Image (cartoon, rainbow, N blue to C red):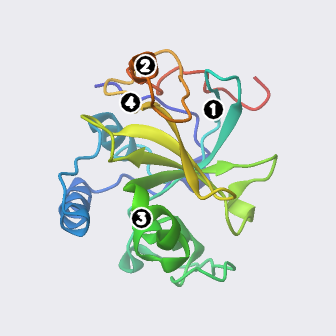
Amino acid sequence: MKTIDLEYEPNNLLGPARRARIRAFEKWLRGFWERPVRLPASYVEHITTFHGGVPGKKCFRTASGRVRVLGRFFNFLEEADIKPPILPTWRPWGMGQDIRLDYRVAEYLDNEHWAIRIDQFHLLPFAGLDTAGHDCRAMNEYDLLCFDYDAEDEPAVVTWDFHESWPHRLPSFCRCCTAARIGSRRRLSTRSDQAMGRHRWYHRCHLRSRGG
């Protein structure tokens, strides 16, 4: 499976995510949600090469015409992974010693600031979205890109709007990183809507540089 390089900022990459840690996280999440959980294979392949990075190709357009901007992918770091120099968090909800821990995937499930709003949806955040021209890395709250485990088969990809505290559905993560575009849905309600969900969001999918 070929991993697509989204032209990440090199100084923001954290090194490959450990597969053993990812599998341990899946096991923990299965117990937490009391349901089967498996991260999409294409996502796992991607973060074992590009872990927690800020992409250069970050813009995508939904089928409804809205442009969304990927701010950064979240990570699977633990406290013990943090090496000096320490980058203190400035966010009031940050619970770790370093701001890089603000972007831990698990933080959005066990930190009450986020969990109280997203837990009801069985969402797994994996990236932050820039909003209204604001970089999510400079925001206290921001929109999220998530896997939706209420969906059937491979989890769908949804955006979660922090103003509304409500998810908006997108297609599922591309298994082979070869699909061409993103389709967008607010809620699945008809067979035609469900058919749109079979399109895959990753690979070319109109991800491009801001100036592109």
Residue at mark 2: 199
Residue at mark 3: 119
Tell me the amino acid under the disc marked 3. Answer: Asp
Crowding near the residue tagged with mark 2, few <14, some 14–19, many ≥20 C-alpha atoms within 10 Å: many
Judge depth for marks 2 and 1 and give the one in front. Answer: 2
Left or right of 104? Residue 161 is right
Tell me the amino acid under the disc marked 1. Answer: Lys
Q: Position of residue 66 (x, y in %)?
A: 71, 29
* Residue nearest the viewer, comparing 17 with 58: 58
Residue shown at 80%/47% (left/top)? 132
Judge depth for marks 3 and 2 and give the one in front. Answer: 3
The secondary structure type at the circle numbered 1 is: loop
Tell me the amino acid under the disc marked 4. Answer: Thr
Judge depth for marks 2 and 4 and give the one in front. Answer: 2
Residue shown at 47%/70% (left/top)? 115
Residue contact at pointers 3 and 2, CB within 8 angstroms: no
Judge depth for marks 1 and 3 and give the one in front. Answer: 3
Residue at mark 4: 3
Q: CA distance from mark 1 to mark 3?
A: 30 Å
Judge depth for marks 3 and 4 and give the one in front. Answer: 3
Return the disc, 3 or 2, that comes first in the chain's sequence.
3
Residue at mark 1: 57
Q: Quadrant of residue 124?
A: bottom left
The secondary structure type at the circle numbered 4 is: loop
Q: CA distance from mark 3 to mark 4?
A: 30 Å
